[in-house]
């Protein structure tokens, strides 16, 4: 026996850890716990991933098998969380609370690699129940690189795909440069214009709306508004155009956005942040 052993107090066994027997609680209390866990309402997000993203960023050829394209639906009771995986009883008992958390909103990603493929995948019959529940649909982030100009028939069946939808929002993003060149601090004429003393007032008054409303035509949102009107489908269409200004190190330094109401007759700016 070493001198250290003499100096230390005798070792004692740790008390046993007794797990809390959740299922021994009355069912009413169990249900209340689920309601508390899922108290915050949220929607679902939809995006797609797969080999195109690996190819576009040079991640092939490192000994890792590239995954196949896959549609991801997260949030609401479509999401995957620990309670669903714990056991069959917990999955079934928590379903009413998980279903109540769904606020009927959906956001669909539109990215540079897959463009509108996630939206096209949603047209499958197996997603009909999910589509039938949606009341608010958001699609983005559109840009000149991710969408070009959508075909005029893109929105033709939107009112049948999403029969309960009441609001459709499209977001379109652009980047602008603060400096002429990465290696110099000379500012662009566009940047100097938006920094002028009278620019903000003119922006808030709507004088710059025509510089931001062109995505409505590019995304065929006027055609969408006409389609909804002809189908007597009560749905409001919005477009948000955003500009991110970056410096010569590509750090974001300023943001602008305008939200438009889109109707069959045209677009109207309703919210502006210079």
Image: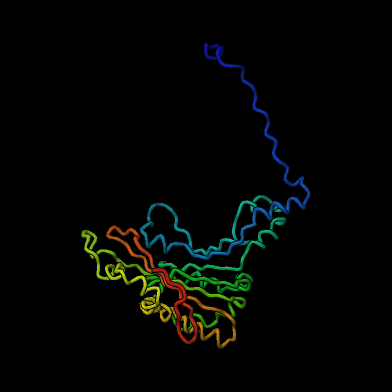
Q: Is residue 240 visible?
A: no
Q: Say if 252 sits above or below 266 in the image.
A: above
Q: For this view, does 179 lie left or right of residue 95?
A: left
- Quick one: quadrant of the N terminus? top right
Q: Quadrant of the C terminus?
A: bottom left
Decide if residue 184 is on the left or right side of residue 174.
left
Query: Number of numbered discs present?
Result: 0
Q: Position of residue 60 (x, y in %)?
A: 38, 57
Question: How are the residues colored?
Answer: rainbow
Q: Residue at x 55, y 13 (%)?
A: 7
Question: Quadrant location of residue 99?
Answer: bottom right
Q: Position of residue 70 (x, y in %)?
A: 51, 63
* Residue 84 x/y as whole percent: 65, 54
The front one of 79 and 214 is: 214
Judge from the rendering whether residue 134 lies leftward or rightward of residue 149; answer left or right. Answer: right
Q: Residue at x 22, y 60 (%)?
A: 185
Residues 236 and 150: in front is: 236
Up-down: is 150 above or below 57?
below
Residue 116 visible somewhere in the drawing:
yes
Q: Is residue 73 above or below residue 241?
A: above
Q: Position of residue 180 (x, y in %)?
A: 23, 65
Residue lying at the far right in this picture: please name it: 26
């Amino acid at each position: 026996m070493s001198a250290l052993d003499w100096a230390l107090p005798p070792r004692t066994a740790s008390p046993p850890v007794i797990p809390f027997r959740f299922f021994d609680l009355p069912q009413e209390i169990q249900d209340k716990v689920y309601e508390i866990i899922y108290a915050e309402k949220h929607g679902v997000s939809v995006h797609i991933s797969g080999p195109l993203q690996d190819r576009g960023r040079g991640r092939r050829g490192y000994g890792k098998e590239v995954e196949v394209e896959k549609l991801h639906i997260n949030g609401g009771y479509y999401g995957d969380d620990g309670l669903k995986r714990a056991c069959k009883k917990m999955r079934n008992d928590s379903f009413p609370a998980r279903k109540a958390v769904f606020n009927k909103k959906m956001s669909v990603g539109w990215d540079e690699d897959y463009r509108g493929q996630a939206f096209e995948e949603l047209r499958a019959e197996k997603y009909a129940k999910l589509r039938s529940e949606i009341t608010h649909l958001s699609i983005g982030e559109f840009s000149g690189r991710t969408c070009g100009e959508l075909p005029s028939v893109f929105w033709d069946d939107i009112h049948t795909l999403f029969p309960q939808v009441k609001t459709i929002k499209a977001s379109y993003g652009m980047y602008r440069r603060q400096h002429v060149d990465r290696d110099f601090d000379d500012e662009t004429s566009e940047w100097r214009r938006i920094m002028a003393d009278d620019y903000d007032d003119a922006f808030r008054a709507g004088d710059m709306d025509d510089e931001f409303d062109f995505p409505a035509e590019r995304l065929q949102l006027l055609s969408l508004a006409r389609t909804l009107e002809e189908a007597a489908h009560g749905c409001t269409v919005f477009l948000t155009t955003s500009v991110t200004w970056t410096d010569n190190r590509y750090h974001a330094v300023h943001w602008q956005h305008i939200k438009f109401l889109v109707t069959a007759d045209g677009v109207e700016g309703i919210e502006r942040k210079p």
